[in-house]
Image (tube, rainbow, N blue to C red):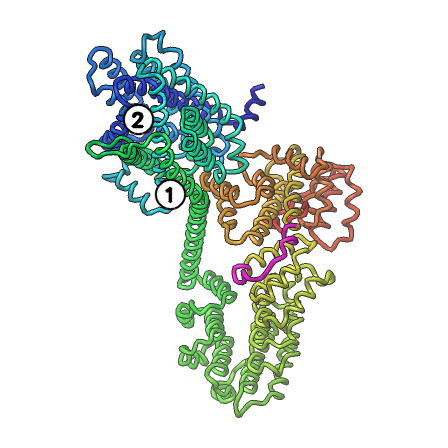
Amino acid sequence: MLYRLRRFLDVRPGEGLSVLLSFLYISLVVASFLLAKPIRNGLFLKDNSPYSLVYVYAAVPIALTLFVPLYARAVARIGPRLLTAATLGFFALNVVAFWYAFSFHPFKLLPGVFFVWVNCFGVIAPVQAWSFANSLFDTRQAKRLFGLIGAGASFGAIAGGVMARYLVKPVGGAVNMLLVLAVLIVLAAVIVTVANARIRRKIVTRAAVASRDPVRDAIRQIAASPYLRLMAALVFLVAIATQWSAFQLSLVADERFKSDADALTRFFGTFNFALGAVSFILQLLVTGPALRRFGIAVTVLVLPLSFGFGTALIWLIPGISSVLLTNGFDQGFRFSVDKASYELLYLPIAPAQRIPVKNAIDIIVNRVADACGALLLGLATQGFAWIPGLGLGLRGTAAINLVFVGMWTAVAWRLRAEYVRTIHESIHRHRLDTERAASTTIEKSAAEALRSKLAGGDAEEVRYALGLLEVQRTRSWQPALRALLQNPEADIRRRALSLLRSAGDREIGPTAVEMLKDTDLGVRTEALLYLTREMRVDPLAQIQQLGDFEDFSIRAGMAAFLASPGPAQNLDAARALLETMVRAKGPDGARERAEAARLMALVPDSFLDLLGELLSDENEAVAREAIRSATIVTRDELVRPLIQTLARPELVDEATGALARYGNHIIPEIEERLRDDRTPQDIRRELPSVLVRIGTTEAEQALIGSLLQADVTLRHRVIASLNKLRTLHPEVKLDPSTINLLLAAEIAGHYRSYQVLGPLKERLKDDDPVLLAMHNAMDQELDRIFRLMGLLLPGVGLHDAYVGLRSSDELVRANSLELLDNVLDPELRHLLVPLLDSQVSTNERIAIANRLVGAPLDTAEQAVETLLSSEDPWLRSSAVYAVGALQLHSLEGELNRFDDDSDPVLKQSVRAARRRLRGEMVPAQVHEPAPAAMGLGVGTG
């Protein structure tokens, strides 16, 4: 029964105590206030005209002006926890003092002083109560739970109304009701004390960091933020509109009960009780579902629109019924839907700033509005002080109030969009900070480590650093490389000189001449090649002077000299030398072939056949040099051999860059390869990167045409590449039906993954390779889902939300989900948010999947069988491993279909699984999928 109740109220495990104490605290505060209001009204109207209310309304800001700075400094010094309990204790003592004064020492201004005190209490105590709730829950929890917690306000309204209605006579009149009020405030202080001892808050506010003037700092911050300015404007307008409505209620009540304090107290108590009951029902049944389904974009407009309708009714039909209806809308919706929505508006504000800003808006702005409203009300009715009024009654004040309500509605409308923008801004700032910190740390540490290795005395460290630079080929390291030309190790001198030659460094010419006399033949050869290519020196003259050169260096130097443009150019002789170098074998053959590849870039049109041959050279260094020359040559004859090099992971980056140099010219060839299933899969998977590097609208159209790929890894790369190009060419039109089709398939596939995951989790440990592969694959699915949504909804911060959802900060994750809740269409939101909300358990997601996808998987055998049919090769390997690890003999026959598979990992997994099924021991490294190899894509979807 308790479980069903918790599910109905949408309270998750671990939240019960926080919800209960928040509910009780807010109930007692509201009950206190709504008991104080009838007492206040009855005692004041007994001796004063309703039109005198304008003076007590105006006096409230003066009292708060004295209180707020002291309160802000106390918060900064001792923190809000202790101060909240202390403030409630102080208020309880105030009430006892008022009871004593009314009973034994009444004076003329006492009802007015008490009226001002009640209004101050009605501002400060609820602000403290909701700040307390804000500190316990993040954005997502607040959206689920504030409807329930806000029901405490409605319950308090009922309790306050009942006490005001039925306890006046038994306790001996309105004055003695003050003792009941004191007891309620003391109970609220007890609740806060218990909560401080038992609950850890999500938002920790530390004392001792405060500025000298926290109130002024908060006001300055409000003035600087468009969002906070709108919040302040909303509070200002709401305060005036509701103040005028409360005045209208006091006016008609005074006319009806003729200054009878006890009757007025009972009337206002009955009214509060009735509206509290309505509000309580709305809070339990409507607020939570409305916030979850529509968000604050809708709920923040409920009160101004209904209030505007009631005010228009007062203008049309002035009388007690229309006034009661308008105040009913106010109290019914304000303590239910509107209050929860309003408190949610504070959640995008940074936690450290939230409490001072909330205090400034809810206390200072609210009371300034009271003062302005009181002045305007006096001028509209019977005057203010010595200034005469217009003498307006119900109809006239309602007409003016309609203007305030109209402005209130306009501000609320604008605030909806600003709320989303503020949430997006907060998670965007988090993403930028995270990326900046990570990239700065990585770049700085990597650069320092590399520089340290180059300058160090350890030859192996220097060689390692040179190996990295031979891949990067960046000019920024030239000064460090020049220093290595004097290194005692010959191979280090040679490799440094080779890197400087490739970078075209002309500053080392004199040093290269000296290095022709180096004791090492390899160094002298590099020096000769440098002088031949960069300084246009005749190699024969240098060889005759120095002698003792290796044969290949003579050929390389001569070929470089004969191929270089100028009077001595002889391409036939250069070809003969280069053909000899291209077919060189033996220990130095790879180096000679690499030099041939490098030299072919000197005359682009003359050696294309030889360069194409070197592009497929089995030696990595030779093929890399050939790709670099092909990047310079860029001839059609080299396109196909360059595409073939995409199959070699170590050459992919260079080959992709070389192909991209062809631009739109090779896009038809790439499109044909993407469509052709006969093209090797590892080549097809790299082609989207080529299109990204080309970066034209034609390249984007080619990617759009390749979205419907069966291979999940290729589909992932097409989607990722298209996301990158959308930032360059947002004007290109996408077919939303294709994107929606893919998106629906990916979401359904992700839910199917949870169906597979459920039975496996029951049989396997959390660190089992199969589960690791599943989680990795599901991460890839989510990545594709977000990228597809980014194509449908550019510019709404989906990338920021995706990064925020992976944050370790609970508040950042909650804000990311809140952003998605506000920018996604309802249908997509209801499908996607449960997959992302960490407060939704795996079992709940499986239950949703069973409803959406159907065909639930109840056993591990069914789950593994589904994985065996996956498109992802690594998931298939993991499933094969699971067949053996879980001894699933019923699936042994399914392994036969993989006997002829070309994937060596899969074949090895099949052999290991069969051995385990026979009861043989298999070494872990033989059958366990390595986590590092996971993430090739997703196959369950």
- Image: magenta residue range: 726-740
Classify the position of the N terminus by image quarter.
top right
Look at the picture and state if 673 lies above or below 367. below
Q: Position of residue 270 (x, y in %)?
A: 41, 17
Query: Would you place residue 932 above or below residue 306 in this image?
Result: below
Q: Is residue 584 visible?
A: no
| Residue sitting nearer the eye, 662 or 137 | 137
> What amino acid is found at the position of numbered circle 1 in the picture?
Leu
Residue 735 lies, with reference to residue 830, above or below; the image says below
Is residue 828 shown left or right of residue 922?
Answer: left
Residue at the bottom extreme of this rendering: 567
Q: Nearer the viewer, residue 831 or 668?
A: 831
Q: Residue at x 40, y 77 (%)?
A: 507
Decide: marks 1, 2 in contact (CB < 8 A)?
no
Compared to residue 643, the image places residue 9 above or below, namely above
Q: Secondary structure at mark 1?
A: helix
**Marks 1 and 2, how far apart at CA:** 24 Å
- Give the residue at mark 2: 119
Q: Secondary structure at mark 2?
A: helix
Q: Which residue is mark 1?
A: 230
Residue 584 point in image, percent of width and height:
64, 76
Instruction: Depth check: give the residue in front, 135 or 262.
Output: 262
Q: Quadrant of residue 74?
A: top left
Q: Residues within 10 Å of mark 2 (few under 14, many from 20)?
A: many
